[in-house]
Image (spheres, rainbow, N blue to C red):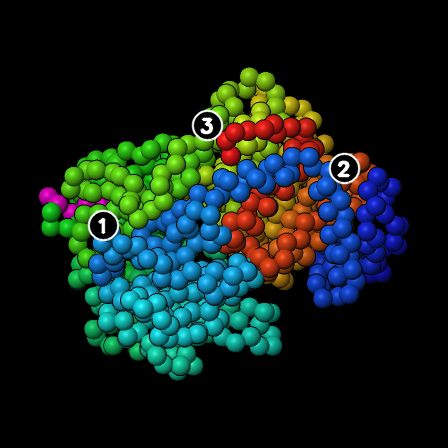
Amino acid sequence: MTQSPPRDTGPSPAPYPFPPAPRSGPVEVVHGLRVADPYRWLEDPLDPATIAWCEAQDRLYAEEESRWPDRDRLLARMTALLAGGGARPPVARGGREFHVRREPGRELAALAVREGDRTRTLLDPLDADPSGTTVLDAWEPSWEGDLVAVQLSSGGTEHSVLRVLDTTTGETVDGPVDRVRRSPVAWLPGGRAFYYVRRLPSGPGDGGLPPRRVRLHRVGAPADQDVEIFGAGRSATQYYTVATAPDGRILVVGASEGTSPRTDLWTADLTRTGPERPDLRPLRHDAAGRTTVRLRPGAGPLLLRTTEGAPRGRIAAAPYDAADPGGWHTLVPEQPGTVLQDFAVLDGPRLDRPLLAVVRTRHAVGELTLHDARTGARTGTVPLPGQGTITTLTARQEPGHELWFGYTDHITPTTVLHYDAVTGHLRPWPGGAAAMAPAAGVTVTQEVVRSRDGTEVRMFVLSPSGRPDRPRPAVLTGYGGFGASMTPGFTPQALPWVRAGGVYAVACVRGGGEEGEEWHRAGRREHKLNTFDDFDAAADRLLHEGWAAPGRLGVLGSSNGGLLAGAALTRRPETYVAVVCAAPLLDMARYERSGMGASWRDEYGTAADSDQFARLVSYSPYHRVREGARYPAVLLAVFDGDTRVDPAHARKMCAALQWASTGEAPVVLRTERGVGHATRASSRSARLYADVMAFFAHHLGLHLPEDPLP
């Protein structure tokens, strides 16, 4: 039922000439609740009225940006901090080491291959598109290393196109194959075929989200001849994974509903049926846990990383057709106080016994231990450079004793390290970028905060002295969703801020994965308010303990973290002086209708259910904007190529805040074109970081003096 729209009362008096935005949207009765949506017309980016309004917002943003005296200085520092290049851990195949690396001064990462002591670039997106708007989304070499499947997308859309390259020549030998959004690729031995995931063509009634299918592709054959393996009759919001063993015997297919913390798995023995008609049998179904499989050559058991019966994770072994998780043999059990993140197998002939290298986090800080692969008994620890994060582990698919991984923390750029399990030596990998020392003048501490219900919440605090010696301008950020953890990672935007005398804090609130799957579940769906309560408690801790100066506290969040920042803004606007929401979810009544929102129902709930809809609207930032409130300065940043979170969220929120606020603070919309939610050129990242921190510096009163360091 739709009622007449409210009368347009015109913009509230304010020192900023906000562009007019008619409040012409409907008031609907949904599940008995009256829900107003005055700016629904801003959902259509092609409407001339929306275009004109956005152009006016661009002009307003330019005027606001011109008031930030430290913006150019910050841009120079961000550019310098991001100019050093870097690399990710290599994937070793057929005597070659494939890796993504960004050379110093280059805008984008390229795919490189190292053979012996020689490294050469195999694919540089800038060669195909000098504008820098085409990026490498994913890549996977064949088991022999003579071919590599690459996926590129343009304009930030993440609508990838897959091609197969010859490793020796770099020439394209297969493709293009479209409708593959960062698809997993599982090669069969010999490089003649691989399994992958492709969407069906868009059609009427699919809501812009056509279903996915697992397919078998023969290299050199047209994609429309690919054999469908899995997915028929399943939900359009299902995501699939595929993996094969190096010897080609076992195929594993995984399925999850959206971002649900549950995984269903099927396995097939391809030696019995051939690759076109795998006899997929359930390995794990309808259980409340995530499970991933590590495949090795031979007929040994599958190795599983699972939260089945262990919310903080365990490593188990199972026959490939063992459908009952109760029959899985636990090798490395759940460890209290830590969360299992990853593991790799080291089983080369030079080792006394096969090993498991196991990565855990303890209150979001990484640890790396070694275990006997037959018994699970702990045999040692690999010391790390600091209190940081271990990125993806990689090891050889054939028996070996080498391990690669990345290390980073809040003040140290990522370095790729190489561990030799025979000698015990841990060194920088020669194929990576030169290791950089931690940034000077910044100290990181971890604080314990008590939330409203007494739950302990961890918070990283970056400060000049490592103690609350005096109240300072402070920025607080967090995420709190999808089981994603706010582990330590290089934070270039924080370094000049702290060296100038500010504080930058990262709250590990519920909804994330910092304390395991139970921590995630405690901040999702009907428990979402815990996320916001935790964040409120972190803000109060900064103020009450003297880290942050009253009247000089800001909030920063992006994506789901943008929802967190928007909730903080509308729950307690008097607490903050400046708020930045980047690519945010803000209209929770209609989030399912755009972008990838339909895939997130398991995380947030759905408007189709009356109780869930009432909860969504109760905290939806867009619906909590109140006329006459004194809101802080707000910067909403969006990217027009974003296919995950529709920029309409921020447009509607911007119009609502500009109409409602009676304060003197600006509300501005920063629209960046030609980029999306994820990977971007380094200069684009530098400009975004500089703009955000210059906004905070201006409104929180922190001057950034000349600094000889970046």
Residue in front for this viewpoint, 221 or 433: 433
Q: Which badge, 1 or 2, comes first in the chain's sequence? A: 1
Q: Identify the residue at image location x=58%, y=24%.
A: 501
Q: Position of residue 611 (x, y in %)?
A: 63, 52
**Residues at marks 3 and 2, CA–CA distance in whole angstroms:** 34 Å
Q: Indicate the quadrant where residue 434 lies.
A: top left
Question: Which residue is under mark 2?
Answer: 665
Side of 630 relative to 697 (left or right): right
Q: Nearer the viewer, mark 3 or mark 2?
A: 3
Question: Which residue is under mark 1?
Answer: 345
Looking at the rendered structure, the kind of residue marked 3 is: Ala
Region of the chain picked out in magenta, as a range: 351-358
Q: Which badge, 1 or 3, comes first in the chain's sequence? A: 1
Question: Which residue is under mark 3?
Answer: 440
Does residue 189 appear anywhere in the picture? yes
Q: Which badge, 3 or 2, comes first in the chain's sequence? A: 3
Q: Is residue 464 above or below residue 223?
A: above
